[in-house]
Amino acid sequence: MTRLPAVLVLIAALGAFGATACDSDSDGGSGGGDKKMSFVVANISLNFALEMANGGKFAAEETGGIDLLVVGPPTTDGPQEVQMFQNATTTHKDGSVVENLAPDLFTRPYAQAVDKGIPIVALDTVPLEGSKVELYVGNDNYELGTQLADEAIKRLPPNASGTVVLGVPNPGVPVLDMRAKGIQDTFAKKLPGITVKGPFQTFSDPGQSYNAWSSQVRANAGALAFLGVGDADSYSLARLKKETGGKWLSGGFDLDAKTLEAVKDGTNFVTISPEHYLKGYVAMRLLAEAVKAGKDLPKGWFYTPGLIVDSSNIDKILARQKDDASRRAGIAEDAKKIFADPDSYLRPLKDAR
């Protein structure tokens, strides 16, 4: 079947993790032959999506008998991602893992795919009511926000007062908003003398992110800390802190190489990793194993843990993130633990945050 030219271009751009993953194992499970599945991400340019896609590819290869198509727009573009999802589920009908930043746009396309009998796993963004998607794999994002706030509070004076500036790259995305709420609530509870300003929109595009944070740094010269809940926030803040000689705390999320460098050299005091590689692996393995066995997917919120990365473990994480082989080895213990008792990680979908 002919695909849209934009999809072909984007597949070619996926060299960092490969557009397809076909295992040499010829056993395709029930029905015979390779199972044709897709893994759809919101942005093929940013670390968080690359990590999830690479984790998904690992699970597909490890399971065997999976022809995996990985697609996503070059920049965050909800309508374009919806089109890619719909194209992918036309050619790869055996199942799809989808990470997106526009859950409202996906509600109807999800439901249409489910009605056609295509199993869908929502990854990292909670599916909205009406989507008919019944399995979500993701973190407790409120918990991740509290972790970032707690790490900042450890580094501020007792009973500190002043301003902390908070950024959210895509306001309205529930999981990102939930991280911000965790930060706000933790400061209100533990350091009530701190005023948390924002959250302000700081954008996922690196250039826009830098410009947005540059404006906030200029407007809040006396702030004690600048905290962001997205991928680009961490390295935008690190760059600005170096350029301005800032003495404020800077911290954020994810494991982009520039972010890890900023933690290593002490520019950023911490980064909170949602462990996207592990999360992508878990989502794809759940889908692949269910489809190959001819079983229904589990139902609910499949909780995956995050990780605090600071000076105490940065060298270990740098070694783990060196290449894909080290990532695979690095998640092996966690993956073994999760799949030894997967039911213990399931929570009600309504509780996902």
Image (spheres, rainbow, N blue to C red):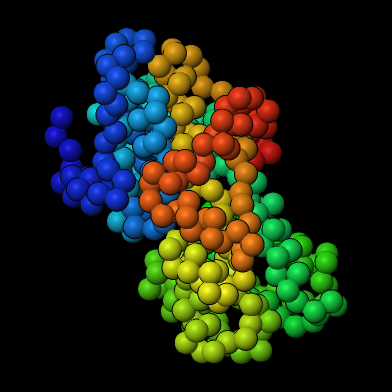
Residue 157 percent coordinates (x, y): 80, 79
Q: Residue furthest top?
A: 31
| Above or below, 196 relative to 283 | below
Q: Nearer the viewer, residue 207 or 324?
A: 324
Q: Residue at x 46, y 79 (%)?
A: 239
Q: Residue at x 83, y 72 (%)?
A: 192
| Above or below, 313 relative to 27 | below
Q: Is residue 49 visible?
A: no
Instruction: Locate the N terminus by quadrant.
Output: top left
Residue 22 percent coordinates (x, y): 27, 29
Q: How many marks?
A: 0
> Where on the picture, by quarter, is residue 223?
bottom right
Residue 259 percent coordinates (x, y): 49, 66
Residue 331 percent coordinates (x, y): 51, 41
Q: Residue at x 57, y 42 (%)?
A: 138
Q: Residue at x 38, y 46 (%)?
A: 324
